[in-house]
Image (cartoon, rainbow, N blue to C red):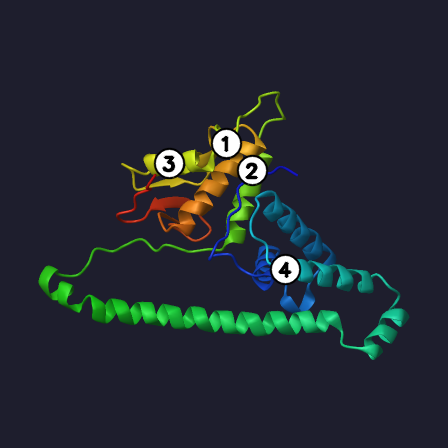
Amino acid sequence: MENTGYEVKLEMFEGPLDLLLHLIKKNEVSIYDIPIALITQQYLVYIDLMKTLNLDIAGEFLVMAATLIHIKSKMLLPPSETDEDDEDGDDPMAELVRRLTEYKRFKDAAMLLEERESRWRDVFGREESFKEYGPPEAEPTLFDFSLFDLLDSLRVVIERLPEKTAIEFTSEELSVKDRMNIVMERLENIQSISFDSLFENDKTRMAVIATFLALLELVKLRLVRIQQVKEFDAIRIFKSEGAELNG
């Protein structure tokens, strides 16, 4: 496994239930009818990618991986054996569905409250400026998304890479800190850049990973934000207002 020697711990990092909901949405399947073999395979691919990136993976991700593998193995057993196992204890598939539906309900409720808070803040917080300067100019709707959406885009970038070459990169050339500076320099005089354009000069998997880790570190430091101007549109990176990278 490739290793950049750089570990990223993110506040934005989400849990295994978020990853499962992401996969369910991505595959357009129902929580109540999960294709467990497909979801388990894709879940393990994400785990491997996060390990390659040296992301700080919580133990609960590995516990969920074991749970999915257990459920998958049970579903391969003949119905009579599965029924006998269910009589001895809880059905792990039913328990997983229960956890997912309960988590999704609370998550949706939290998002609704956040949207309401944002609307009320806009109504009352801008009242004085509205009187003085008139109605604000319309701003484009920006859609936030999860780390797993970013990993989807990263996989696409990696799949586009040319076949392995004999080019060797030094640790200096792969410096995450250097790449952080490059991203900030590119955002100095323009509003935003596309996610794909970040990797236009990266020709190897290791180079792509270093650039991606630099981006995650900038997000962690709140120097950039990653959003979409239109839902399901291309990902863009915006420089945070007044952001400067020290050092």
Q: Is residue 52 left or right of residue 246?
A: right
Please tell me whether mark 2 sits on a helix, a strand or a loop. Answer: loop
Work out whether mark 2 precedes mark 3 in sequence or the reverse, and give the earlier one.
Answer: 2
Per the model, the C-alpha gap separating discs 2 and 3 is: 17 Å
Mark identifier at residue 174 = 1
Residue type highlighted by circle 4: Gly
The quarter of the picture where the N terminus appears is top right
The residue at which mark 3 appears reads as 181
Q: Is residue 230 left or right of residue 31?
A: left
Per the model, the C-alpha gap separating discs 4 and 2 is: 22 Å
Work out whether mark 2 precedes mark 1 in sequence or the reverse, and give the earlier one.
Answer: 2
Please tell me whether mark 4 sits on a helix, a strand or a loop. Answer: helix
What residue appears at the point 65 percent right and 54 percent down from the top-left corner? Answer: 43
Per the model, the C-alpha gap separating discs 2 and 1 is: 8 Å
Horizontal and vertical percent for residue 152? 55, 47
Horizontal and vertical percent for residue 226? 41, 49
Please tell me whether mark 3 sits on a helix, a strand or a loop. Answer: helix
**Dot 3 crowding, Cα within 10 Å, few <14, some 14–19, many 20+:** some
Residue type highlighted by circle 3: Asn
Per the model, the C-alpha gap separating discs 1 and 3 is: 13 Å
Work out whether mark 1 precedes mark 3 in sequence or the reverse, and give the earlier one.
Answer: 1
